[in-house]
Image: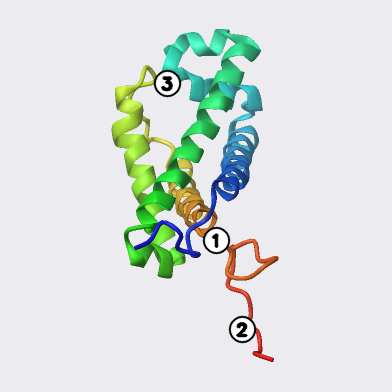
Amino acid sequence: MLHGDSRVSGWPRVGLGTLVAGMSDLVFAMGFWWISHDVPPMRILQSIAAGWYGEASFSGGMQTAAVGALSHFALIFLFIAAYRQMAKHIAGLRHRPGAMGVAYGLFLYLLMNFVVLPLSAAGMASFRNVAWVVASIAVHALIGVLCARYALAPRSPGNAGLAPGPARPQA
């Protein structure tokens, strides 16, 4: 596998994917908790910062919310960059980004909830809210697909890489 494989994206695309996947995840989490429990959006960002500060993140105001936002987007960037790097060496990741993206998203869910969170100041995730757990698993599958799609180059000019473009007739 050559580093110049046209099916692997460039770093600007990874950056764009970071914004798209990161915002998708945040809008989901903020919307879920606001609608179901009247939790303000800033508190979601502070809950991310709890990985660094523990409970103190909730009294840190905008500063800890900013740390939470930065941490969130940094993780999403790493997720897409990791898929990009693996796709250079594993053809299945390049040729089946939908299925592999879903699997990658489920892996990310397990990684975050059973490795990253328990090792952070936030501690082990709670699985008592079944609606949140089910929705979070589904959204992680979607995030995995976004990671895969943005880690790979679009199939044709103008194609965002989110769906295969129609075959172009040869002239």
Choose mark 3 or mark 2, whichever is in front: 2
Name the amino acid, label 2.
Ala
Q: Left or right: where does residue 113 sit relative to residue 35?
A: left
Whether pointer 1 and pointer 3 mark residues with C-beta atoms closer than 8 Å, the reply is: no
Q: Nearer the viewer, residue 113 or 132?
A: 113
Query: Which quadrant: the C terminus?
Result: bottom right
34 horizontally vs 132: left or right: right
Q: Quadrant of residue 88?
A: bottom left
As measured in the structure, the alpha-carbon distance from the residue carrying label 1 to the one carrying label 3 is 33 Å
Hey, which quadrant is residue 141 in on the image? bottom left
Q: As displayed, is residue 43 above or below residue 89?
A: above
What residue sits right under mark 2 in the picture? 167
Q: Are marks 1 and 2 in contact (CB under 8 Å)?
A: no
The residue beneath circle 3 is 51
Residue 51: x, y in percent?
Answer: 42, 21
Q: Position of residue 43 (x, y in %)?
A: 59, 22
Camera-nearest label, 1 or 3: 1
Residue on which the image places disc 1: 153
Residue 71 at x, y percent in the picture: 51, 26
Alpha carbon separation for disc pair 1 and 2: 16 Å
Give the residue at x 37% y 36%. Answer: 112
> Does label 3 or label 2 sit earlier along the sequence?
3
Question: Spatial distance from mark 3 to mark 2, Cα to Cα?
Answer: 46 Å
Residue 38's place in the image compared with 144, above or below, is above
Instruction: Tell me if mark 1 has few (under 14), some (14-19) or many (20+) residues whose alpha carbon lies within 10 angstroms of its own.
Output: many
Q: Secondary structure at mark 1?
A: loop
Residue type, mark 3 in image: Gly
- Classify 7 as above or below 42: below
- Give the residue displayed 54% in from the left and 54% down from the top: 150
Q: Residue at x 61, y 45 (%)?
A: 24
User: x, y (%) of residue 149?
Assistant: 52, 58
Q: How many marks?
A: 3
